[in-house]
Image: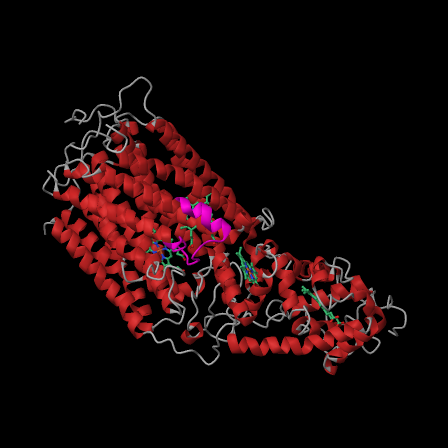
Amino acid sequence: MKMTPALAMVGSLLVFWASVLVAIILPAITMTETPSTAWRPWTSAETAGHDLYVKNGCSYCHSLYVRVSDWDLGADRIAERGDYAGQNPAILGTERTGPDLSQDGGEHPDDWHWAHFTNPRYTRPLSLMPSWEFLGWPAVSNLTAYVQSLGSRDADYRVARQQRWKAPAVRAYAGGPDVNVDWLHAQVPAGWLAMPNPYPATEAALQRGQKIYEGFCLNCHGPVGDGQGVAEKYLSPPPLNFTTLKRHLAQGRYVGGLFYYQIMNGITGTAMPYFKHELESEKIWDVSNFMAVRFLGYTDAGTAPRGIEAAYEPAWSNAFQSLAPKGVRP
Amino acid sequence: MTLATQTHGTAKAFLAAGAFWFLAGTVFGLIAAIHLVAPEFFNNVPFLVFGRTRPVHVNTVIFGFTASTLIGCAYYYVPALLRTPLWSERLGWVSWFSWNLTVLSGFFTFPFGFTQGREYAEYLWIFDVSLVVAMLAMIVNFTMTVATRIENVLYVSVWYALGACLWSAANYPIGNVMWHPLTGALPGLLDSVFLWFYGHNLVGMLLTPLSIAVVYYVVPRVARTPLYSHTLSLIGFWTLVSMYAHIGGHHILQAPIPNWLKTISVVDSVAMIVPVFTVLVNVWLTARGHGARLWRDPAARFIMAGTAWYLVTCIQGPLQSLPSIQKVTHFTNWTIGHAHIAVLGFSGMIALGGLWHILPLVTGRPLHSPRLVNLQFALLTFGLAGFFAVLTAAGLIQGEAWHNGETVYRVLPEIAVYMALRAMFGVSILAASAIGLYVAIMSLRPAPGSVPATSCGTSLHPAPNSVPATSCGGTPKSSCTATVPDQEAAP
Ligand code: HEM
Ligand code: HEM
């Protein structure tokens, strides 16, 4: 076969355009754009936020679709074609330096996002996300509106839930530390309140707990657990000052199960996120022990009721129990 | 003879621009990499924020560095292989200006938040137009050069150069949705089908054919031997365009696009083994027995390394197209590793090989310093091998951990050390690009006291059928002094 100019040019164009026909024109004709059941149109603030998302390259770190194999944010809703109807442009993304955001709406209340966009390390100490403080207001507010809309109707449901719990949380906080703590603990299911931390607070466990605390909690609750982390001034209600808990240990005694539940489940309506995706059981128990020992000077680790001893438990006696704060009967 | 009509003026200008953009684009790569190590290093400096510097990096290294350099090579070898002068140097300069205007625009738009935001299609509409003008100018120029040629036979490099221009002139407007000037996008999920058809063909139908063309040009010349097989050349060319062009779906394989599109993307991604291996076999069998000569030539060393990276890229590519593997590698730094060995290892290495081979031909003087070129090779190879290793490792860690149920946030500390190593290896690549720019400038500078160079590699050097070999570039150190036969007096 001799390559003449005509063959090289016309031939290669024909083959190329055959590919265009298959890979571009055919999908353009056949791909239907029926909105999915979750779909809804954007408000003007959300559109403005989406525009910022496109212009600032959020898409280089965040994807906008959840796959069957995912576990992280939004894993409860696999992406459907109709989710993207009319979005212009719907940038799916190819990297997950940060988590998928397609279902992020309602994961957090707005104040969490304001702190986070100002400086992501305020709410997420190990984050690699850039600070967007320079965008200023109303950009941050529009970005927040956009992010809160991700997931459409499903997101609306979650956002409404955040708002529903925000009001009582703010009211409780306004009532002073004691009212606040009483309200918080009143929301925790009784079974958890009566459950001590089943695992020993050995030196190694406390160190593991500290590592978790520094990687996940530090900039909200602060290095000494007084709720004065750098994020504090953005959040309402502000992060809990654990030292106020000394007077309020659940049923005058327990703290392990209470912490576990709050950390696992988060406190919807406040900036306190849930950590059940992020921290497995042992990590939550360890950080609970760490906070109890460091900030309250007391832990209920290893006290009754406790069932069968765990196989790995070292010989350990709870020296922190005798340090129980005043008013607590060990 | 003015600048606008000087023989090889366009080629020189594109080569110089390529060497410059290599440095400029790589600086932005390092800025982006620093962010991923220390996100508060440039805290709240709007034009240095990751989401804005990354597109400057990516577009500049693709359109500025690799594509410009490869186009510069084409502006030389197309006329040379056809034994005729370029049809119009003026039109060549038009393409140079409009191409580089687009690349330049990236530095003044993306950092300030002006972008269309779709990966590889970020340039604003007006600069899309400018790039398409450049491509059309190239098509006209090359077609007319073919039409006015003296050499009857079209050497395989010419097919690829023509193909690359023709394909890209269509691919670019389609992928950039240029009929929607404001957004440069389509509404809905269909947009991603267009985007990744384009994104894939940007590397596959522009960088790949232009790179292969340079390989086919340089290797037989330096080895001083005819090309191994015309049949393999044909198979490689026709299978490339028939299989590469429609597999862009493998970039969005796990998104809710139609299943039939996924199927053909996966099947023909695997079939890509055919065009890749025919080309590699053809080139390597041509090189067989001439290894020492190729290795000692600084330019050919780059080219041969480029073919090796092509092999790695294109073993990796089909593998990561398989759903069972991509389930783990997608969204991770594995893909970033693939992108760097592909665009820098394959296209970039070959572009540099072309640059160092062709510079002496267009200036008529040896390279300023073959030793510095060898140093550049060493630094690049070190940096890139490091990139590949650490990014692949980081990608596997991310992918496996996510798959195992860990969140993205949890895995960030696990890849921190790899991100730091990447930035370190990046310094090596940055140094390589600076050295390259220095050697290119020094080699292009008019030699003091000499008449403008026309003595070597003029447009009429011999290019018999499948042997574009002259003695030029064949000697050790590629010092293409005045050893080219059939020298032609200045026009
Ligand atoms: C046999 C040939 C090839 C195949 C089958 C292939 C396959 C792929 C696949 C499946 C991806 C997507 C990975 C993912 O997102 O999970 C990808 C990404 C990429 N490939 Fe290749 N590839 C091949 C050759 C090349 C070549 C020759 C180049 C460059 C000259 C290249 C450049 C890229 C780039 C830059 C990306 C990153 C795209 C992005 O996500 O931003 N590839 N490739
Ligand atoms: C100093 C040297 C370099 C450094 C530090 C560097 C760093 C980076 C970084 C941080 C990214 C973004 C990755 C991400 O989103 O996670 C990137 C992307 C990219 N770089 Fe580089 N780079 C360098 C040199 C180069 C060169 C010389 C080329 C090509 C010739 C290149 C081609 C690319 C491409 C194609 C992408 C897009 C990858 C994708 O989207 O999958 N880089 N680089």
Residue B108 pos. (x, y %):
46, 46
The image quadrant of residue A174 is bottom right
Q: Quadrant of the N terminus of chain B?
A: top left
Residue occupying image coordinates x 66% and y 66%: A111
A129 or B17: nearer the viewer: B17
Q: Is residue A4 magenta?
A: no
The image quadrant of residue B77 is top left
A65 or A40: nearer the viewer: A40
Residue A143 pos. (x, y %):
56, 64
State the residue lying farthest toward the right. A326
State the residue lying farthest toward the bottom. A190
B81 over A34 or under it: above or below: above
Residue occupying image coordinates x 39% and y 65%: B252
State the residue lying farthest toward the top. B449
Q: Is residue B115 magenta?
A: yes
* Image position of B408 (left or right of B282): right
Q: Give the colour scheme shown.
A: secondary structure
Residue occupying image coordinates x 81% and y 74%: A175
Task: Count numbered badges in the picture.
Answer: 0
B326 or A308: nearer the viewer: B326
Q: Is residue B365 visible?
A: yes
* Image position of B27 (left or right of B159): right
In this picture, which residue range is highlighted in magenta? B104-125
B105 over A295 or under it: above or below: above
Residue B452 pos. (x, y %):
26, 23
Q: Quadrant of the C terminus of chain B?
A: top left
The image quadrant of residue B87 is top left
Q: Is residue A201 visible?
A: no
* Image position of B132 (left or right of A118): left
Residue occupying image coordinates x 77% and y 72%: A302
Residue A329 pos. (x, y %):
88, 74
B452 over A305 or under it: above or below: above
